[in-house]
Image (cartoon, rainbow, N blue to C red):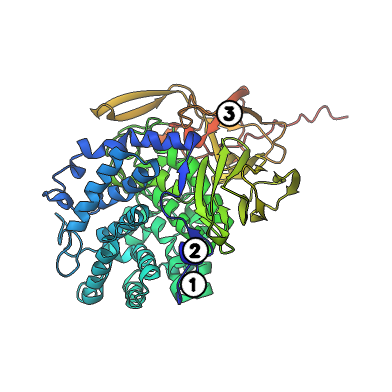
Amino acid sequence: MSAAYLFGRAPLAPRALAPLPLGSIRAEGWLLGQLRLQAASLTGHLDEFWPDLGPDNLWLGGTREGWERGPYYADGLIPLAYLLADDRLQAKARRWVEALLRFQDDTGWIGPVQAPGRRPYDAWPAMIVLKGLTQYQEATGDDRVIPYLIRFCGYLRDYLDERPLFDWGASRWGDLALSLCWLYERTGEAWLLELMDRAHQQGYDWIAHFRDFAFTRKLAAEECVMHTHVVNNAMAVKTPGVWYRRSLAESDRQAVALALANLDRYHGQATGVFSGDEHYAGRDPSQGTELCAVVELMFSLECLLSILGEPALADRLEKIAYNALPAAFSPDMWAHQYDQQANQVLCTRAPRQWTNNGPDSNLFGLEPNYGCCTANLHQGWPKLVAHLWLATPDEGLAAAAYGPCRVTARVRGGQVVTVVDETDYPFGETIRFRVEAAAPLAFPLWLRVPAWAEEASLRVGGAPAVLAPGTFHVIERTWSPGDVVELHLPMAVRAARRYREALTLERGPLVYALKIGEEWRQIGGELPHGDWEVYPTTPWNYGLCLDPDHLGASVEVRTRPVGEVPFSPDGAPVELRVLGRRVPEWTLWENSAGPLPPSPVASSAPEETLTLIPYGCTNLRVTEFPQIAPPRQGRGDRP
């Protein structure tokens, strides 16, 4: 099985878990609905009306753009098309694939030599092409892909000293290293590893960057450089882990956790991402995070989960995927934001406290602020689906992240099995795994137990078991067709301390935010892909009246069946009811929620019952709340 699923090839360090070929995992339930929603909106139609991806794109033989946007789009379109087995989308994907495969010169160089306004021989867009085509090759077996990629790597081998990596390519060399590992494991060409060494030498030293982290506050515009850019950092989180496979140095492996810890400590947001609007912006929940950073951080975690096999990486992946990702889109996915805010109470074309982004940055629209996210947003949901399951070194399957789906793969002895994951997770607590096979077969099933899941339990064959949080629980047995494993992950409400001692409520992988009334105003564009401002129609400046150490009596949980569009204010499948009071002095500042009053804060406003819904269901929200100080007790009369 290790040969089939490519855990590794010496001298590379083996992966802890092996990715399955694209198409092995199929979404079901609400998750399938999310992919179909994406196919029916921007991803499925963007090239029909956005000029940058139209027939005049330089990658397609025209004269427009010709840098990263075409490759970005293909990198997300390909997995979506093949996960849905959608003929229309596959035809679109093949159009890009054929254009890419044709666009190689005699030296092996891929694509335009020079995009308009760019330096010549910029390797960064070609690195995205490698990512997209490796997925296409796994889905289709197209025998043209590997020779094509080898020829480009041959160009790098021959010309990298003369035309070294620069700017974006030097910052994002980890993405090149990832594809070099993929190629080496399939070809055994030792010079590919030597090329990886040269890319490492020319690339930015992210391991030292995160080890000696010097960026402990929001940056001024004049301080911003390539290595403070939010998307570069989101991509760079995987770089120490990818390089560890080559270096075999334990310090490089450990650098991944250090990177995430430093980003959390100084710039972390409640949803598992870090701020960057467009560069490091601190922990204030009114700062923004770019959508490109959300999808790239997800991809980094997906890669690292395979390399390192650490359950905590999947915990974070789910937190980002089920909160920050859907929140960046309108519920119909026809519009997106460039920057989202954890405390987002007004979305208008206006200046804000961004590090250096423009006034359009938190509009919902087609191309707010800049078009990179318009091209790159497409990879988020499909790549999540493609990494829900991984192969294990003991010839089994690991449920690494949870969502309704089915996986079909070879297990011990080369036998084929399908495991169906029936669940409303992350909204519901129960996951049922049903085994489908032609005959009984023996293999291990690994089930991730999230760190937050205290008293998690499972039942298989009538026997219950209690599970340890933050681990993979392994079931080794002979499975009969129709066997069912029922995993229960209790979702107790938790309170997290955030910026200025504010409180955020969480339940399972979901973060909860205040449900705010909305008025959408179209200010540009053409329907269905218009540009929208969103105004609040209900108050937002509340603090919470609760004891974070005793939440059971303070928070009421209400659930309902998951509908067709769960990530919407009216479709939210879970609500929390809590008491709060208005904080009158907490007002708008620079068109955003003003600085958080340090907790605890006094308020004489009357208590009100507040409704909190999952962060990903909101368009306007407050996520980090001041804690209301308890009333002072009277001292009574002195004797």
Mark 3 residue type: Glu
Mark 1 residue type: Ala
Q: Is residue 371 visible?
A: no
Left or right of 327 on screen, residue 170: left
Q: In which quarter of the image is residue 112?
A: bottom left
Q: In which quarter of the image is residue 236?
A: bottom left
The nearer-to-camera label among 2 and 3 is 2
The nearer-to-camera label among 3 and 1 is 1
Residue 304 in percent (x, y) is at 48, 60
Is there CB contact under 8 Å for labels 1 and 2?
A: yes
Residue pointed to by mark 3: 575
Residue 220: which disc?
Answer: none
Residue 307: which disc?
Answer: 2
Residue pointed to by mark 1: 13
Mark 2 residue type: Ile
Q: Is mark 3 on a helix, strand or loop?
A: strand
Q: In which quarter of the image is residue 209?
A: bottom left
Q: How far apart in space, not on screen, are marks 2 and 3 (Cα)?
A: 36 Å
Asked if 286 appears above or below 560 in the picture, the reply is below
Residue 69 in percent (x, y) is at 25, 49
Residue 183 in percent (x, y) is at 35, 67
Residue 341 in percent (x, y) is at 43, 40
Judging depth in this view, the residue of 522 and 429 nearest the camera is: 429
Q: Is residue 443 visible?
A: yes
Is tag 1's residue or tag 2's residue first in the polypeptide sequence?
A: 1
| Quadrant (top left, top right, bottom left, bottom right) of the C terminus | top right
